[in-house]
Image: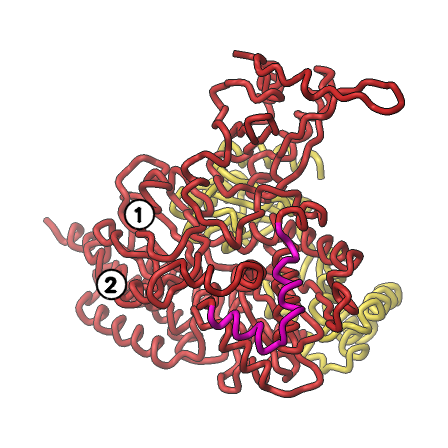
Chain colours: A yellow, B red
Amino acid sequence: MAVDSPDASVKDRVRALVAAHRGDRGALLPILHRIQAEFGWIDQQVVPVLAAELNLSRADVHGVITFYTDFRSEPAGRTTVKLCRAEACQSVGAEKVVAHAEQVLGIKVGQTTPDGSVTLEQVFCLGNCALGPAAQVNGRVVGRLDPRRLDALLVTETVNS
Amino acid sequence: MTTGHGNGEAMTTSHGNGETMTTPVTVYVPRDSAALSVGADQVAAAIQREAALAGRPVEVVRNGSRGMLWLEPLVEVETARGRIGYGPVDPDEVAGLVAAGLLDGADHELNQGVVEELPWLRDQTRICFARVGVTDPLSPQDYVAHGGLAGLRRALDLTPAEVVAEVTESGLRGRGGAGFPAGIKWKTVLDTPGPLKFVCCNADEGDSGTFADRMLMEGDPFTLIEGMTIAAHAVGASEGYLYVRSEYPDAVRTLRQAIDIARAQGWLGERILGSELTFDLFVRVGAGAYICGEETAMLESLEGKRGMVRAKPPIPAITGLFGKPTVVNNVLTLGSVPAILANGAAAYRDLGVERSRGTQVFQLAGNIARGGVFETAFGITLHDLIYTYGGGTRTGRPLRAVQVGGPLGQYLPAANLDLPMDYEAFAAADAMLGHGGIVVFDDTVDMASMARFAMEFCAEESCGKCTPCRVGAVRGVEVIDRIVAGEDPDGNLALLGDLCELMTEGSLCAMGGLTPNPVRSALLHFPDDFTARYEEARRP
């Protein structure tokens, strides 16, 4: 069974990442961030490795991974667009931007386009509440967003990535 | 006027080796992520490029933001008259601006004048934000030159108990929202014996409409480091953690760099500033869970667990991170401590009103013409902030509602804006000052959908530990949907009232306990939004 016999190279990498955080207190979150940064998502097969290395139960590790929205259970698209839907951005038309994005990409929030180019996500506050609607595109914050600006960004970002 | 200031000559100096070179003009372009979100990096690059083409040496400093976010990217040029601001600057406009004499502070339609003389800045009392926007956030020289470390140096000359007394006397209350007196919390940690204690900074600023924590972390991180170090000395802690939300990658990078610099400067680590104090600091990044802004959930997350709220007591001051005595304070609380120590408790306490002492960094957000941070003594009215400084709505339409204190704060109608901004006045008006975030809505807002959103957000972000929050929020969405659809509105309104009461009284923490605030206030002040649609539908 795949869960019990993870790919040897993945196993080694995960062990190395755990070793890099050996002296840290309560290191599971930093380790998970590193795994996601390296692989782009968190494969179920790392759960038993982490559990064994950190002396935790598989249930504990699984519970942490699934609690936090950042940790992905499948790879994201090449471009990730996170649209802010919190109150401050709603007050300046965030929902119009969300509706536009869903329409032009042909997917709903939380989904990835079938060609794997764009993952569309929602986020509640990026701390850019005076320059909304805000978004985070491939890790960079964008302000004063409108459908036209989003279209332009989607073109440049998907070409670059 | 294009050039005309004639300070080109004044800026030419002669160097010892006989070469004559022009002293570079200092140009400030913010690195704050709000400024970056509207093109500050491109503006900085364009200035370098255009200045080089014009044969003018420039030194571009990436400062924090002044907090006048409607002017971002705000470019400032150092001149004999002071720092002249231009904004908002589009990257495409830089060539024209440089040609028009930007590097000499020349007139231009984007020229805002001397930045520090602008009413928005002049009318503030900047204590926590004194250096934000002024200095290079990662320059230890700038930090010390602008008064940095004075608080820590004084604290290290005092006993821990004296430092705690100073903070208590200043009247400083927790800026994260709850407003608990910081000195009392610190005294509890100091009085709890233990070989290992922690100082934790709650930088999980998840409330919509708040961004002051982020701006301080990106714009003056050493202040926060200094505040945490003072706290460590005051309570006997040796290790500190900054828990920053993952939505703030720029703040995380800046803090990590600042901590490395502080260690190299001897401001962190062993024998800090030559004293007996040993304290080190680590940044931990959240993973997209709003609830981790609740202090006990944050501690669980720091321990590497699910961010589940803990029952209190025991309080974190006694049984905190890994069960050890722990100070947990917000960014702005800790960021205010260095100035309190440097200038004395009395100077801080003299500001403000009643039991709200000192300053608060208010944040104007949402549908607002001039949004940003405005640090001033408690007591200014909401109306003054929104109209005098904020300029009303961005759309120019009438203001309809304001939410103060984040997603768990009440909605106030346009008629109730004369409230003074202090903890007690807000509490007396059945509202909550919280973290000082102010979100403005114009008359297009549908308050029934905002009430529904409050419940939806709670359902999405609840940690799931207690039933009133976990189940109540889901039921809340359903009940509001039935009311809006005109299904037995009286019965369902009564049910919603019961549900809100149950959540308020029965939830373990503020998430479930305060979610009824926006819902009930929307119902109270904007009842028509909940019933108009079905009444219209019933008309023949």
Q: Amino acid at mark 2?
A: Ile
Q: Nearer the viewer, residue B150 or B31?
A: B150
Q: Residue A83 in the image: x percent, y percent?
A: 52, 48
Q: Quadrant of the C terminus of chain A?
A: top right
Q: Residue at x 71, y 19 (%)?
A: B56
**Which portion, as a residue range, is magenta?**
B147-169
Give residue B135's mark.
none
In magenta stretch: residue B492: no
Left-right relation of B448 to B86: left
Q: Nearer the viewer, residue B71 or B207?
A: B71
Among the 4 quarters of the image, the one containing residue A44: bottom right
Q: Are both tags, 1 and 2, on one chain?
A: yes
SS assignment for the magenta stretch, majority = helix
Left-right relation of B185 to B442: right
Q: Residue at x 31, y 42 (%)?
A: B387
Residue marked by disc 2? B483
Give whichever of discs 1 and 2 has the lower sequence position.
1
Contact between marks 1 and 2 (CB within 8 A): the answer is: no
Among the 4 quarters of the image, the one containing residue A32: bottom right
Q: Amino acid at mark 1?
A: Val
Label 1 packing within 10 angstroms: few (<14), some (14-19), many (20+): some
Vertical order, B293 against B69 (above or below): below
Q: Nearer the viewer, residue B468 or B314?
A: B314
Residue marked by disc 1? B445
Q: Residue at x 31, y 73 (%)?
A: B500
Q: Quadrant of the N terminus of chain A?
A: bottom right
Q: Residue B28 in the image: x percent, y percent?
A: 62, 34
Is residue B132 at all visible to an observer of this figure?
yes
Q: Residue at x 68, y 16 (%)?
A: B9
Q: How many marks?
A: 2
Q: Nearer the viewer, residue B423 or A127?
A: B423
Disc 1 from disc 2: Cα separation: 18 Å
